[in-house]
Image (cartoon, rainbow, N blue to C red):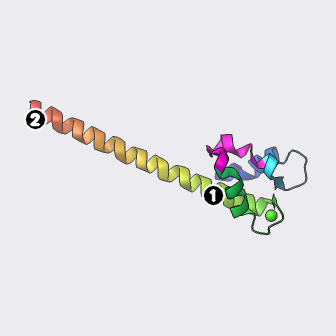
Amino acid sequence: MYRHSHHVFELLDMDGGHTIGLGEFKATRFLFNIKEEDLSRIFKDFDISGDEQLNYKEFKMFTIFCIDRQQKKQKEKLRKQTLAIKSATNVGATVV
Ligand SMILES: [Ca+2]
């Protein structure tokens, strides 16, 4: 995803202005699994220049943040699965 961030940026930049406004940014909600109520806050957090537009640099920071967040979630999921497998194996062991 990170490598494709420029491509994603171009897709979202529907008016071709080389920036993403809040309206365009809303489409990322589906790509990155963001709650609607968090969108404006996240948008403001990454709008470093404060012009209510995300340029490519600001958008890239946002995609890095999202990928990081997704990886943390995946790790947590994997950890839980491993624990579940371990406990399942332990149960099996006691039965035998
Ligand atoms: Ca900006």
Residue at 79% of width from left, 69% of height from top?
49
Which residue occupies 67% across, 45% down?
36
Q: Please tell me which residue is depicted at 42% across the width and 49% down the height of the picture.
A: 76
Q: In which quarter of the image is the C terminus?
A: top left
Is the stretch drawn in magenta largely helix, strand or loop?
helix
Give the residue pinned by disc 2: 94
Magenta range is 25-37
SS assignment at label 2:
helix
Tell me the kind of residue under disc 2. Thr
The residue sitting at 55% across, 54% down in the picture is 69
Q: Nearer the viewer, residue 75 or 6?
A: 75
User: Where is residue 59 drawn, in percent x and y?
Assistant: 73, 58
Q: Indicate the position of residue 32 as horizontal and vertical percent values.
A: 63, 45
Q: Distance between the residues labelled 1 and 2?
A: 45 Å
What secondary structure is found at the residue carrying circle 1? helix
Q: Does the magenta stretch include residue 33?
A: yes
Q: Where is residue 82 in the image (x, y as percent from the top left)?
A: 32, 43
Specify the label residue 48 is tagged with.
Answer: none
Residue behind mark 1:
64
Q: Does the magenta stretch include residue 68?
A: no
Count of numbered tags: 2
Structural crowding at the residue carrying mark 1, measured as other residues with C-alpha within 10 Å and reported as few (<14), some (14–19) or many (≥20): some
Rendering quadrant holding ligand 1: bottom right
Q: Where is residue 50 in the image (x, y as percent from the top left)?
A: 80, 67
Picture quarter containing residue 91?
A: top left
The residue closer to the viewer here, 92 or 50, is 50
